[in-house]
Image (tube, helix red, strand yellow):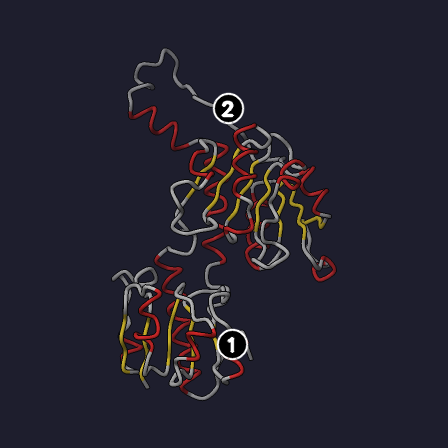
Amino acid sequence: MKAVILDGYTTNPGDLSWDWLKEKCELTVFDRTPAEKIVERCTGYDIIITNKTPLNKDTLMQLPDCKFIALLSTGYNIIDCDYAASRNIPVSNIPAYSTAAVAQLTFSFVLELCNKVAIHNTEVKKGKWSECKDFCFWKTPLQELSGKTFGIVGYGSIGSAVAKIAAAFNMSVIAHTANPAKYADVKDVEFVSLDELLSRADIVSMHCPLTPKTAGMVNKDFLEKMKSSAYLINTSRGPVLDEAAVAAALKSGQIAGAGVDVLSTEPPSEDNPLLGCENCLITPHIAWAAFETRQRLMSILEQNVSAFLAGKPINTVNM
């Protein structure tokens, strides 16, 4: 069979190998594929592998040879899964590969917001410590996590991993989820309404999927219910935040700070309102990008392709 990878660079910028796939298929790899080239580059291929390059109904209608779509991601909103199913084209995603990595970045934001490591490192390198009359100094108030309340919105695999880390810091953990009864046996986590979570949490961390209900969920009303001393973390999906509302809340002091790894448009436009907020930490969608995380992704992709070739597709999201 023939396989094409439309946007392989972010998954494998050269530190991993596609050789395993070359042994199974006749393979073509593109680092990136612009919209106008999608149909041309997919024509004649049985297997299409994509991360963020979309395959909508109009595109798939022009690709009669397509038999399998393999994602390089957990999310699958870029694929018209219903149309693919009508053509009996399985769509397989990469589930739960980045749980540990996303939880780790969540606390990278938390620790930076509370300890301001980067600011103090910069000041030391400028010579400020050398000039100091005392044995230490700090440029900004510092905070302990112990005893504070960590609020988790969305309690899936990542949310539960974050809860364990928060508990290890001796924090009280509260969570809001659509189905709290499912977690009746979970210890050390209190499941509460969203309004109660926002009123109590010192840190509000978003771990919900992007759905019509959660798009723009973090809006003016949401932010007004948070403590003025609270921090907002988003490592879920960019459109979960109303970015203009978050920027306004940050600039007015309605909330104390934020850390986001995802934005509504990526790369962001120069006028994205969060870019102008000094108390907002922004990383360029890197939670999933650790070498070990991408190795795990590649391993699951290999399983998905092998299963399809054996006639028993796995991790399908449309069948």
- Image coordinates of residue 288 in percent, x first then y, are 42, 56
Q: Which residue lies at the image location 46% right of the left edge and 49% below the top edge?
A: 262
Q: Which residue lies at the image location 30% right of the left edge and 62% below the top edge?
A: 9
User: Could you give the CA–CA distance between mark 1 and mark 2, rounded to whole angstroms?
Assistant: 49 Å
Residue 89 lies left or right of residue 201; in this view the side is: left
Closest to the camera, between mark 1 and mark 2, is 1
Q: Which residue lies at the image location 68% right of the left edge and 43% below the top edge?
A: 197
Q: Is residue 148 above or below residue 283?
A: above
Image quadrant where one finds the N terminus? bottom left
In the rendered structure, find residue 141 and report the number of the disc placed on it: 2
- Disc 2 residue type (three-letter): Pro
Quadrant in which residue 38 is drawn: bottom left
Residue 59 lies left or right of residue 228; in this view the side is: left
- Image coordinates of residue 272 in percent, x first then y, are 44, 42
Residue 163 lies left or right of residue 310; in this view the side is: right
Other-residue count near label 2 (Cα within 10 Å), few / some / many at <14 / 14–19 / ≥20: few
- Image coordinates of residue 259 in percent, x first then y, are 49, 41
How many marks on residues? 2
- The earlier-in-sequence mark between 1 and 2 is 2
Q: Is mark 2 on a helix, strand or loop?
A: loop
The residue sitting at the bottom extreme is: 311
Q: Is residue 161 above or below residue 85?
A: above
In the rendered structure, find residue 316 and report the number of the disc placed on it: 1
